[in-house]
Amino acid sequence: MSGSSSGSGILQLQGASFGYADRAVVRGVDLDVEPGEVVALLGPNGSGKSTLVRGLLGLNEHLGGSVRLFGTEVERLRDRYRLGYVPQRHTLSASVRATVEEIVAIGRLPHQGWFARRSRADQQIVRESLELVGLSDRAQEDVSTLSGGQQRRVLIARALAAQPDVLIMDEPTAGIDEASQYVLADVLHRLVARGTTMLIVTHELAALRDVVSRIVVLTSGRVIFDDTPAAYAERRAADELAHTHGGHHHDDELPARRPTPTGAHGPVDHLGAP
Ligand code: ADP
């Protein structure tokens, strides 16, 4: 599958810079995402997380360095169709009169509109996508009747329907209640079990703690940390210790503590422990 001439990474960034007009916001990022990895992208507000992921998707300027997918430099918009995207704080407008299934089907054939004829295979993929996000029984309902958390799952299913190689999510748990965040985490677990590679922008790591296999921290547009969740927890504990003794600390760039879900025994179980 990979056909890569340069390492096994699905998505490889080398010295990549992204921004707006000619202003680079994210600078010189090196990142190599392996198949099946789930990378959490953390950082304070304004550090450039959205700029980075939207830059990967071609939604803002790529100002330098290289971005490769399966070893091939991404140049044209069509190269990016292999990246699935669930945008930040996106809710489906109350005025959209469509069923859940119709919204997901748009992800299957995005250029052919809502009324395109879809093959049996397409319809099957749409059904599977709905099943993965646990919304099969809501398929025929008007999407506007669903809760915010359920709509977020509809949008994940819409992205999955395109069968992307990497699923990029911008703050998937933001703006939904805690119970819904854990439902969403269950969905992500299901994707992890299928080997889905994910890049997740988040500031609420608690709900996703045992989904994530790697943590990248961005500050002022630069990567300042890239390692395992366990190493991140250690670093965080060391920073807190330094803070207690009046030293420099990075609290701003670290996620707020949230309660541990019962039964979570993931690799970052101790994350947030002092
Ligand atoms: P984060 O996602 O980490 O909160 P953003 O990527 O949204 O950070 O923002 C990083 C910087 O990019 C901020 O300084 C912000 O003002 C700037 N920025 C974001 N969107 C735009 C835009 N559309 N045009 C110009 N600058 C922008």
Image (cartoon, rainbow, N blue to C red):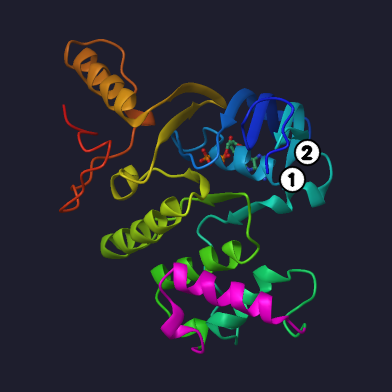
Question: Left of 144 or right of it: where is 193?
Answer: left
Residue located at (40% from left, 37% from top): 213
Question: Residue 215's image quarter?
Answer: top left
Give the magenta part as a residue range. Answer: 117-141
Question: Left of 263 or right of it: where is 186?
Answer: right
Residue located at (31% from left, 43% from top): 209
Image mark for residue 58: 1
Asked if residue 135 is positioned above or below residue 181 in the image, the reply reads: below
Which secondary structure dominates the residues rendered in magenta? Answer: helix
Is 122 colored magenta in this rendering? yes
Q: Nearer the viewer, residue 92 or 265?
A: 265
Q: Nearer the viewer, residue 211 or 36?
A: 36
Callouts 2 and 1 close, C-beta under 8 Å: yes
Task: Tell me which numbered mark, 2 or 1, is placed earlier along the sequence.
Answer: 1
Image mark for residue 29: none
Is 257 colored magenta in this rendering? no
The x and y percentages for residue 221 are 57, 27
The x and y percentages for residue 263 are 16, 52
Q: Secondary structure at mark 2?
A: loop
Disc count in the image?
A: 2
- Disc 1 marks a residue whose amino acid type is Gly
Q: Secondary structure at mark 1?
A: loop
The x and y percentages for residue 73 are 79, 34
Question: Residue 257's image quarter?
Answer: top left
Residue on which disc 2 sits = 74
Q: Nearer the viewer, residue 85 or 93?
A: 85
